Image (tube, rainbow, N blue to C red):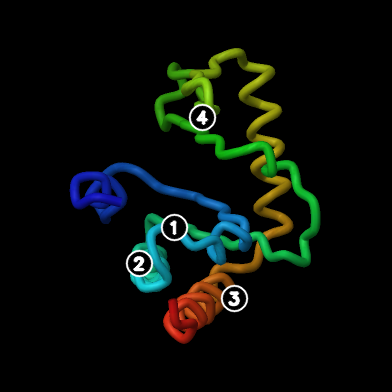
């Protein structure tokens, strides 16, 4: 997350982030193991913010509804604004604004949250996987 986006989730930044990341994504090496370790440590720091709730969906959760790819739900404090979702695919991103579809994606996200580790266990797992990346020689 670049500094501009990082500020969105600072206290007073106006946004709250709830994220569930599948454990397999944390083990997959993108760039190098050193880069992965650095990124995971950064995620751990971001997750300490009171406006960020980062949870890891462990391998033990098995097959899950989020396997088809990332989704982004936007919920607004203003009740006159409808919630929307965004889905990214190899063919491009899609804004989803149909109330029923957004509700189904919200249900899916709630299911993932229910199966994810608590925040403290997620933070420990992030640190453990970062150390694992550091130990393995490329």
Instruction: Give whichever of discs 4 and 2 has the lower sequence position.
Output: 2
For discs 1 and 4, the disc positioned in front in the rendered view: 1
Pointer 2 residue: 35
Question: Counting residues from the N terminus, which is met first, the one under dot 1 or under dot 4?
Answer: 1
Where is residue 52? Give x, y as percent.
41, 57
Q: Which residue is mark 3?
A: 121
Residue farthest front in this picture: 138
Q: Which residue is mark 4?
A: 88
- Dot 3 surroundings within 10 Å: few (below 14), some, or many (20 or more)? few
Q: Is residue 28 above or below residue 133?
A: above
Q: Residue at x 42, y 82 (%)?
A: 134
Q: Report the residue at 50% width, 73% height from top.
A: 126
- From the top left corner, tell me how far across and down residue 123 is, in percent: 50, 73
Q: Mark 3 and mark 2: span between their CA atoms?
A: 22 Å
Mark 3, secondary structure of its residue: helix
Residue shown at 55%/35% (left/top)? 71
Does residue 95 appear to the left or right of 112 in the view shown?
A: left
Q: Is residue 52 above or below residue 48?
A: above
Q: Which residue is mark 1?
A: 30
Q: Give the foreground label among 4 and 2.
A: 2
Residue drawn at 52 percent across, 21 percent down: 91
**Is 30 on the left-hand or right-hand side of 70?**
left
Sequence-wise, the earlier of marks 1 and 3 is: 1
Query: The residue tagged with tag 4: helix, strand or loop?
Result: strand
């Amino acid at each position: 997350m670049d500094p501009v986006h990082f500020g969105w989730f600072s206290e007073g930044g106006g946004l709250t982030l709830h994220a569930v990341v599948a454990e397999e994504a944390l083990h997959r090496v993108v760039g190098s193991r050193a880069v992965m370790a650095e990124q995971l440590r950064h995620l751990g720091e971001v997750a300490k913010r009171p406006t960020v709730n980062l949870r890891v969906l462990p391998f033990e959760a098995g097959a899950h509804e989020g396997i088809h790819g990332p989704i982004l739900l936007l919920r607004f404090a203003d009740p006159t604004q409808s919630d929307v979702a965004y889905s990214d695919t190899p063919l491009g991103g899609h804004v989803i604004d149909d109330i029923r579809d957004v509700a189904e994606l919200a249900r899916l996200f709630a299911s993932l949250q229910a199966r994810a580790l608590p925040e403290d266990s997620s933070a420990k797992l992030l640190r453990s996987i970062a150390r694992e990346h550091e130990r393995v020689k490329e």
